[in-house]
Amino acid sequence: MSDLKVHEFKVAMTCEGCSGAVERVLGKMKGKGVEDFNINLEAQKVEVKSSLPANEILEVIKKTGKETQLISSA
Amino acid sequence: MSDLKVHEFKVAMTCEGCSGAVERVLGKMKGKGVEDFNINLEAQKVEVKSSLPANEILEVIKKTGKETQLISSA
């Protein structure tokens, strides 16, 4: 079993269409390395609990076309 | 040289963050099979002039997490 970490990302989201898009993309990764996630539209932050390296999750979020960056992993 | 076609897609976009995300993703494909594209946020339509099959472009747009479907190819 891999260790689970919580990775926090800043993601540019301006409406519920934006956050919904991120939700769908991360939702597809549930059971594929992503254990759980939480999207905060107002704070423009996304927390992902995962066994995957932060970089790999960052690439998936980038595929949405949203500007994003890793804030922290713990 | 492959033939260029114009593929029209319906893409669920509700703000400029949404259309900007689609723009960034398609922009990365310029010179990689995508010749040009036009995004109409209000009409929720995206036209892509490309030598790629419509399916391939549809998959790229889907990666944004937006709900999308092909309307026509001509």
Image (tube, coloured by chain):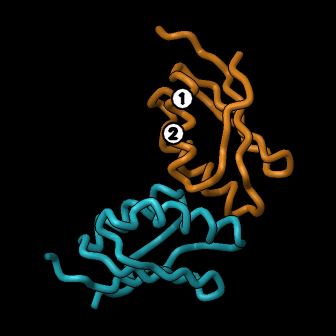
Chain colours: A orange, B cyan
Dot 1: chain letter = A
- Image coordinates for residue B20, horizontal then vertical, percent: 63, 67
Q: Which residue is mark 1?
A: A55
- Image coordinates for residue B18, horizontal then vertical, percent: 64, 67
- The residue at 71%/46% (across/down) is A11
Quadrant where the N terminus of chain B lies?
bottom left
- Image coordinates for residue B72, horizontal then vertical, percent: 34, 87
- The residue at 34%/66% (across/down) is B31
- The residue at 44%/30% (across/down) is A32
The residue type indicated by label 1 comes to Asn
Q: Is residue A2 toward the left or the right of residue B17 in the image?
A: left
Q: Are marks 1 and 2 in contact (CB under 8 Å)?
A: yes
Whether A50 is drawn above or below B15: the answer is above
Whether A16 is drawn above or below A52: the answer is below
CA–CA distance between discs 1 and 2? Answer: 6 Å
Residue B52 disc label: none
The residue type indicated by label 2 comes to Glu
Secondary element at tag 2 = helix
- Image coordinates for residue B2, horizontal then vertical, percent: 16, 76
Whether B25 is drawn above or below A69: the answer is below
Q: Which residue is mark 2?
A: A59
- Within 10 Å of disc 1 (Cα), the crowding (few <14, some 14-19, many 20+) is few
Dot 2: chain letter = A
